[in-house]
Image (cartoon, rainbow, N blue to C red):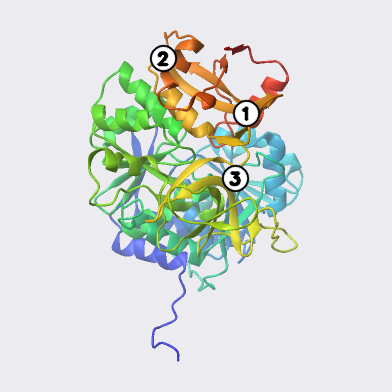
Amino acid sequence: MLSTMQDEQLSLATLLRYASTFQGDSTVSTWTGDGIRTQTYREVGADSARLANALRDLGIGEGDRVGTFMWNNNEHMVAYVAIPAMGAVLHALNIRLFPEQLVYVANHAEDQVVIVDGSLLPMFAQYLPNLKTVRHVIVANGDAAALTAPAGVQVHSYAELLAAQPDTFDFPIVDERSAAGMCYTSGTTGDPKGVVYSHRSNYLHAMQVISPNGMGFDNSDTVLAIVPLFHANAWGIPYAALMSGANVLMPDRFLQPAPLLEMMAAVKPTFAAAVPTIWGGVLAGLQAAPQDISHLRTCVVGGAAVPPSMMRAFQERHSVTLLHAWGMTETSPLGSVAHPPAAAEGEEAWAYRYTQGRFPAGVQARLVADDGTVVPNDGQALGELEVKGPWITGAYYSPTGAEVDPDKFHDGWLRTGDVGKISANGYLTLVDRSKDVIKSGGEWISSVDLENAVVGHPAVAEAAVIGVPDEKWDERPLVAVVLAEGAEVKPEELRDFLSDKFAKWQLPEHWAFIDEVPKTSVGKFDKKRLRAQYADGALTVTTLS
């Protein structure tokens, strides 16, 4: 028996029409360094139609890939919705990838057009001669004449292209399972892998983002979108904002603590999203120059675990809630959010906030042991996290067809590579990445737990923990410490600081003081580079007895 419901496609074109019509007075704004420039969603809708017309004139049709090489700004927001709404596929290129990786992903995706921010032209010009399928480059917020293109590639001005087009477009009705956008993983091991999002997955994901158990923003909010639009589907924020009518503040290239605090003072956003390194910088900025940021109701933090000390500092000093979330490029990315249960209070509520959060109804999750058995959700048993759901990829993109790598997928489940535990009421606590967990004497030591504890010392700004070879124990932890400005501390003091938080055998004996923890293209600790530095003898290591 079938239902009587209408079979309406979950299309991003439908979302665009809704936002530009019924949420038309909401805005997207870009920080310029000394102010903002603003468009209403109604104007975003008109510019989306102009861009779709321009792309069609350049030969772009359904399924064709259009890349973006841009900061978070108004033009990128227009591209985010116009490209999939016209039936093409948005490919947000990660400007922080290594050059060979950037060229690889653009060629692998077979991008035909790339929209480039004018401030990024010098960087993009180095890549363009190696981009085999690109036929057109559109320059936004800059001088198109400044880019010298190889034969066969035409360069256009974004402003001039759009000015020549009508502000209406007959957006097609596409199958909701067709491709809407694609992102590539950061490629920390091997080539980056492509994930293709559908109209359906993005639509359902946006509904989860704006729900109270997700990020929970609505049309009374202004969202400071610090997370790059080129990273992990922008955490779904562009589509969630259009769906809810929330205003969006885009920081453009101004991502340092000082300009972020300046735009907070000027616009007073109520919601923000960024990785922990951003919030660490903001916290240090506030320490140097105090400022009221209590207008921020919630700051969602993902990409890495947030040290409890940082959560406490924001809450107790600035009345700002840092909300832990977990996800990855492959999960669109929202996988879990750490809202405490309503009945939890005091330290119990904090304990829930330290977790990676509770899975929503759309995400199924299980833990699998090394022998392939599923372990219980009892808050104690550890295993590799595997997930499945309507906004979780079931394969990686290949020009010759979807690829299901058995190292990444298991009986239809995505293998996340994260090791953790799940409580009976569905809260996830990650212990480590499977490749980062330290196996010492047959027991596991969590590098994440050690990092969070070390950062709790007032002399420490950042800490990264890796396992290093040990003849007796197989591996032992090495802590690489970045000191806070003007601070001094000895390894013995730091180990003593940890002594009441860890068993004696877990306490690290190897310590190194460094100027900066190496980061990946998306701001995560690059432990592969840190291990290489150790292997090459580039770290000065103190070993305690």
Three-letter code, disc 3: Leu
| Residue 309 appears in view | yes
Q: Secondary structure at mark 2?
A: loop
Q: Counting residues from the N terminus, which is met first, the one under dot 2 or under dot 3?
A: 3
Q: Looking at the image, is mark 2 or mark 3 nearer the viewer?
A: 2
Check the image and report above or below for 44 versus 498: below
Residue at 35% over, 65% down = 18
Residue that mark 2 sits on: 459
Residue that mark 1 sits on: 467
Q: Are marks 1 and 3 in contact (CB under 8 Å)?
A: no
Three-letter code, disc 1: Gly
Q: Secondary structure at mark 3?
A: loop
Q: Quadrant of residue 307?
A: top left
Q: Nearer the viewer, residue 45 or 198?
A: 198
Residue at 63% over, 32% down = 441
Three-letter code, disc 2: Ala
Residue that mark 3 sits on: 93
Check the image and report above or below for 72 versus 42: above
